[in-house]
Image (cartoon, grey):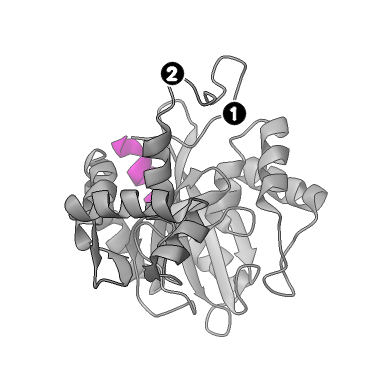
Amino acid sequence: MATPIQSHTSDDVPPKPGDTYVQSFARGLEVIRSFSADAPRQTLSEVAAASGLTRAGARRILLTLQTLRYVETDGKHFALTPRILDLGFAYLSSMPIWNRAEPVMEALVQEVQESCSAAVLDDTDIVYVMRVPTHKIMSISLGVGSRLPAYCTSMGRLLLAELSEDELRTRLEASAPQSLTKHTVTDIDALLAKVAQARRQRWCLVNQELEEGLVSIAAPIVNRAGRAVAALNISGQANRTSAKVMQETMLPPLLEAAQKISRML
């Protein structure tokens, strides 16, 4: 199973463009990443602007992706095709742990009657790798592959707790924390303290920092060395389940579920 990105040392600093760096491939990935829920269909000019390429460069990449059937066009607008899911599925299918974890998550959802998700850390974000929803709890739609900022999410803070202090500060500063609600913690030192608390107690609760009314509590999924490589959470609406009630009644079954999945690793 993949682990969160680790702190960089002098031996594993990402390579600079050179013989080991395929620039055209990197540009192709930028074009793919330019599509999102906010921009599912784009003109050539929009893709070029979003990916930082010239129109000619963006056009070559889009036509290549079209030939490979990852992109379709009506002559003016471009959009990703379902074939693009193959790229993400390759990651999930390489980790059969999530197929085995799904029944554990489903049982947890049945017990607590709230949504359950699993995520891993990717740079400054968490990426959802499994989700078992109940009620619609957020204004945005979440599913496998969805990304959220790590600094203001329960799973994110738990996974950030695995980083060295220097790397943690670097990641938090790179996140450029914003006040998403009146409750969002944005001060770097305050966030460092929140992450340290999550590290000590081995669970994390975030109360309405990502979205008003949303409460989330997370537990770590650890490997044999005891290192958190993913996180499991329960999310609910504050007007239905307060943070206090969630901690008192849902944390024990959440920790048990996380431990069951951890033993599968």
- Residue at 71 percent across and 63 percent down: it is 178
Q: Predominant secondary structure in magenta? A: helix
- Residue at 69 percent across and 74 percent down: it is 181
- Residue at 46 percent across and 25 percent down: it is 225
Q: Which mark is residue 207?
A: none
Marks 2 and 1: which is nearer the front? Answer: 2
**What amino acid does circle 2 point to?**
Asp
Q: Tag 1: Cα neighbours inside 10 Å, few (<14), some, or many (≥20)?
A: some
User: Label 2: which residue?
Assistant: 19
Picture coordinates of residue 48, whole percent (x, y) = 46, 57
Q: Is 161 a magenta residue?
A: no
**What amino acid does circle 1 point to?**
Ser
Q: Quick one: SS at disc 2?
A: loop
Q: Nearer the viewer, residue 21 or 164?
A: 21
- Which residue ends up furthest to the bottom in the rendered image? 239
- Residue at 61 percent across and 19 percent down: it is 9
Q: Which residues are magenta?
A: 256-265
